[in-house]
Image (tube, rainbow, N blue to C red):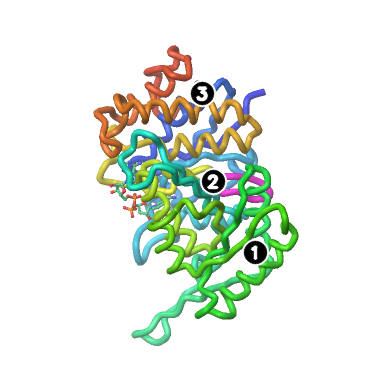
Amino acid sequence: MAHRVTLIPGDGIGPELAEATRRVMDASGIEFEWEVVEAGEACIAQYGTPLPEYVLESIRRNGIAIKGPITTPVGGGFRSVNVSLRQALGLYANLRPARSMKGLDTRYQDVDLVIVRENTEDLYAGIEHMVGKDAAESIKIITRYASERIARFAFEYAVANGRHKVTAVHKANIMKLSDGLFLESCRTVAADYAGRIEFEDRIVDNMCMQLVQKPELYDVMVLPNLYGDIVSDLCAGLVGGLGVAPGANIGEHGAVFEAVHGSAPKYAGLNRANPTALILSGVLMLRHLGHPEAAARVEAALREVVAEGRATTADMGGPAGTSQFADAIIEKLGSPAAVGTAPAGATA
Ligand code: NAD
């Protein structure tokens, strides 16, 4: 039976990347029925919001979505659609693997890290206000419930994926109560995995230095929301940049797969952006849906195309456009019929 998946093309480079990803997923051997729904800038004029209710309804109904990036105005304007989506759907775990790829010009060859970022609280809860006219206050929320839940997710991920160590990242030396509670919660959960999965903790600033000096020392990391946001971009930089960093937002009742990067408006419509991050998010989706072999085949095909370098996008040093890169992967998957079929925004 086909998997019915909500597909949100998104803003900027999103629609091109979503189309490339859809075509690669269709060539994976797994059947999908795509329910294409718009969110983001295009919806504001018509619906008065970048996140109309029908988008949430579609994801709730299907339980699975893959989305292109959505632009968030800086300062005033609408609240981030991405943050609202995660909160509205209870997508409490943000999974961001960062793994080296042969063929990319990076400082390290063997990075294999997994970021597990808490997705619902911390400074991202968006509770802030002015105190008079010359001061502003943002409230950092950390709860035992959410911290233990994300720590358990990280340990369960480690067990299920043959990983050896979980590192909790925090600033509990300064934020003794909030980050202290996060660390204490991680320690509590770690005790249940003693003897199976190693546990350690690092202060976030030290962690950043360690990651750029010796990333091979780390395995799975679990972080509160804001540090997770920042450290995952750092890890993306270790393996080739934002163009290759995939992600998944996972909750009890659904999952939304998306790249770490944003809508890169300057490349919109140029067939130039790198779809690797969104295609690898699709690989995470295939695994989540219980298709590890198909996931492995797509990932291997993508890695082969990147290693060969003949059909990679400009940021990877190659001559190809977004759609030609997808074509090359589809060809490797042995599904030449799918090459070049790219009806934008098609619903199958
Ligand atoms: P960005 O990730 O969009 O782009 C930063 C730079 O990284 C780009 O200028 C480009 O040089 C490079 N880049 C990113 N993705 C690439 C790709 N696939 N291929 C090639 N190069 C790529 O970050 P930004 O400029 O800070 O944000 C732009 C908008 O995206 C903002 O409105 C931001 O809020 C939003 N955003 C959305 C998401 C999301 O939807 N999940 C995530 C991050 C940022």
User: Is 318 left or right of 247, judged from the image as shown?
Assistant: left
Which quadrant of the figure has residue 103? top left
Q: Residue 98: image x %, image y %?
A: 46, 46
Q: Nearer the viewer, residue 18 or 242?
A: 242
Counting other residues with Cα less than 10 Å from the Cα at mark 3, is it few (<14), some (14-19), or many (20 or more)? Answer: some
* Residue that numbered label 1 is attached to: 146
* Residue that numbered label 3 is attached to: 26
- Residues under numbered marks 2 and 3 in contact, where contact means CB atoms less than 8 Å apart: no
Q: Name the front one of labels 2 and 3.
A: 2
Which quadrant of the figure has residue 270? top left
Q: Earlier in the sequence, mark 2 or mark 3?
A: 3
Q: Secondary structure at mark 3?
A: helix
Q: CA distance from mark 2 to mark 1?
A: 18 Å
Q: Is residue 52 visible?
A: no
Q: Is mark 1 within 8 Å of ligand 1?
A: no
| Rendered-image quadrant of the N terminus | top right
Q: Earlier in the sequence, mark 3 or mark 1?
A: 3
Q: Amino acid at mark 3?
A: Asp
User: Is 309 left or right of 127, judged from the image as shown?
Assistant: left
Q: Amino acid at mark 1?
A: Ala
* Residue that numbered label 2 is attached to: 248
Q: Residue 279: image x %, image y %?
A: 45, 34
Q: Residue 336: image x %, image y %?
A: 43, 13
